[in-house]
Image: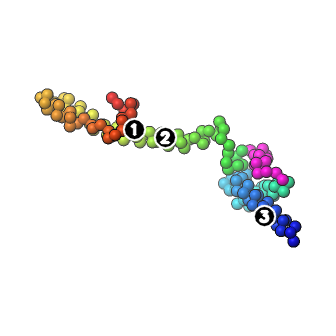
Amino acid sequence: MASEDDAVKNAMIVDARARNISHNVRCTECGSQSIEDSQADIAILLRKLIRDEIRDGKSDKQIYKKLEDDFGETVLYTPKFDMQTAALWLSPVLIGAVAAGGWVYKKHKQKTNVHIMALDLVRGVSLTPKEKETMLDILTPPPSQGARTPFWWRR
């Protein structure tokens, strides 16, 4: 009875490990499905290969390495981070940084453009020194509240 329980436990462990690995391996025929979800012939063979490797005592890393060696890095859903894939991994961060920088620059320009245009209009009008001083006080943008203006925005 104990040996039957051990055999059932081992079968369940093999099955759980095989399913875990199969979810992380792309079907080479379908491309968009894992071999766990695919019913293609190659997926069925790969699932059997994974179970055989587990029964032979291989670790998950060794199985992933074998699959990568046999089918290439694209068979894995989680590619390694190296110089070839750095652009792929870092492109969302770079795009987000450029978008945020553009948004900040646009907001800054919106805040200062009105004041600059108004000051340019006042410069062409003949006013007394007292009127000019009053207009400049009114049209000059107020300093930031608590935050210093970054050096690249100062004029």
Name the foreground residue: 24 vs 141: 141
User: Residue 138 appears at what percent x and percent y?
Assistant: 20, 37
Whether the residues at callouts 3 and 2 have beta carbons within 8 Å, the answer is no
Instruction: Name the residue furthest front.
Output: 2
- Residue at 60% x, 42% y: name it: 89
Which mark sits nearer the N-terminus, 2 or 1? 2
User: Residue 134 appears at what percent x and percent y?
Assistant: 16, 34
Magenta span covers which residues? 57-72
**Which part of the image, by quadrant, shows the C terminus?**
top left
Q: Look at mark 3 in the image and give the residue it sits on.
A: 12
User: Residue 42 appears at what percent x and percent y?
Assistant: 77, 55
Q: Look at mark 2 in the image and give the residue it sits on.
A: 97
- Residue at 56% x, 41% y: name it: 91
Q: Residues within 10 Å of mark 1 (few under 14, many from 20)?
A: few
SS for tag 1? helix
Task: Please say whether residue 143 is one of the residues in the magenta stretch.
Answer: no
Which mark sits nearer the N-terminus, 1 or 3? 3
